[in-house]
Image (spheres, rainbow, N blue to C red):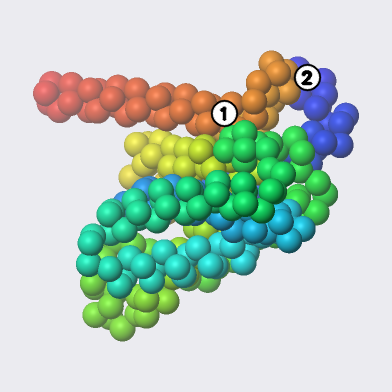
Amino acid sequence: MIEILLEPFRYDFMIRSLITAFASGAMLSLLGPFTINRNMGFMADAMAHATLPIIAVGVFLGFSISELGVPAAILIAIFLGLIIKNTNVGEDTAIGIIFSSFFALGFVLISLLNVTINLEDLLFGQILAVSVSDVYIVVSLLILVILVIVIYFKQLLFYSFDPIGAEVKGLNTTFLNYLFLILLSIAIVGSLQTVGIILVLSMLIIPAAAAKLLTETFTVSIRVSVLFGTISSITGMYLSYFLNLPSGPSMSLVATIIFVLAFLSNKIRKKGSLATATIS
């Protein structure tokens, strides 16, 4: 058993991939509970798709996807925040417009700039191709996200549950909103090479949703979400290695299986509690 677990570590590319998978899984699932609590799933999906034009221009200028992470995340977060704040068409409508228009613009720029991008890798991830510098960048982004969450945890928690109350209490809600948008964008852009544009939302939402079914408090759900996210990422990588499956979809499917098990466990627990209450 131990030999099977250690076998992928014989190859440098697998070591890099496993580290990147762990960092991406932890980073996305750490922000997942906040995203679910604020009903920002659609926003996160729009952020992932809005990266395409920036990636096209960046690759044209000679940068890698990982190197574009922080500047692309900041640009996307600020732009989306401004558009949503200053439009009167409704948040979902504004996000939908940005989602579709930016994604279309990305494909147009790829064609106009004659950029060589493997769209399948971009959409579904290509973690096996990560370089040493990519690993350092993703791990650094994970550390950055953790530090910011720890420093601003109470403020972000208050704002997530009661934005009006947070403003009344004197918190800078505009700053907190943009801070979280930037963190979310960083996690999404930093994970594109791991799971791709299409599947990044699954690794952000599914572990957090599974954790929410099994926990009673928000703080505990964050810890469980990170646990589920890292398990999904690492297990998906092992399945990809031994069964010759695509890495990103494998991670997403493992996360889905965990969610189904959590859902069934939650149903069984509720039935048990109901039966106990009936007998009493």
Residue 236 screen position, x and y as percent: 62, 28
Horizontal arrangement in the rendering, residue 252 relative to residue 165 (left or right): right
Q: Is residue 183 above or below residue 212?
A: below
Q: In which quadrant will I find the C terminus? A: top left
Image quadrant assignment for residue 129:
top right
Q: In which quadrant will I find the N terminus? A: top right
Residue 185 screen position, x and y as percent: 52, 58
Specify few, some or many for label 2: CA neighbours under 10 Å numbering under 14, 14-19, or 20 or more: few
Q: Nearer the viewer, mark 1 or mark 2?
A: 1
Q: Is residue 203 visible?
A: no
Question: What is the three-letter code of the residue carrying label 1?
Answer: Pro
Q: Which mark is residue 4?
A: 2
- State which tag comes first along the sequence, 1 or 2: 2
Residue 89 screen position, x and y as percent: 23, 62
Q: Is residue 208 above or below residue 153?
A: above
- Residue pictured at 59% horizontal, 53% vertical: 109
- Residue pictured at 37% horizontal, 76% vertical: 174
Horizontal arrangement in the rendering, residue 40 relative to residue 189 (left or right): left
Question: What is the three-letter code of the residue carrying label 2?
Answer: Ile
Q: Nearer the viewer, residue 63 or 166?
A: 63
Residue 234 screen position, x and y as percent: 65, 33
Q: Nearer the viewer, residue 95 or 218?
A: 95
Q: Is residue 114 visible?
A: yes
Which residue bears the numbered disc 1? 249
- Residue pictured at 38% horizontal, 64% vertical: 157
For the residue labelled by badge 2, is the local secondary structure a helix, a strand or a loop? helix
Compute the Cα span from label 1 to label 2.
22 Å
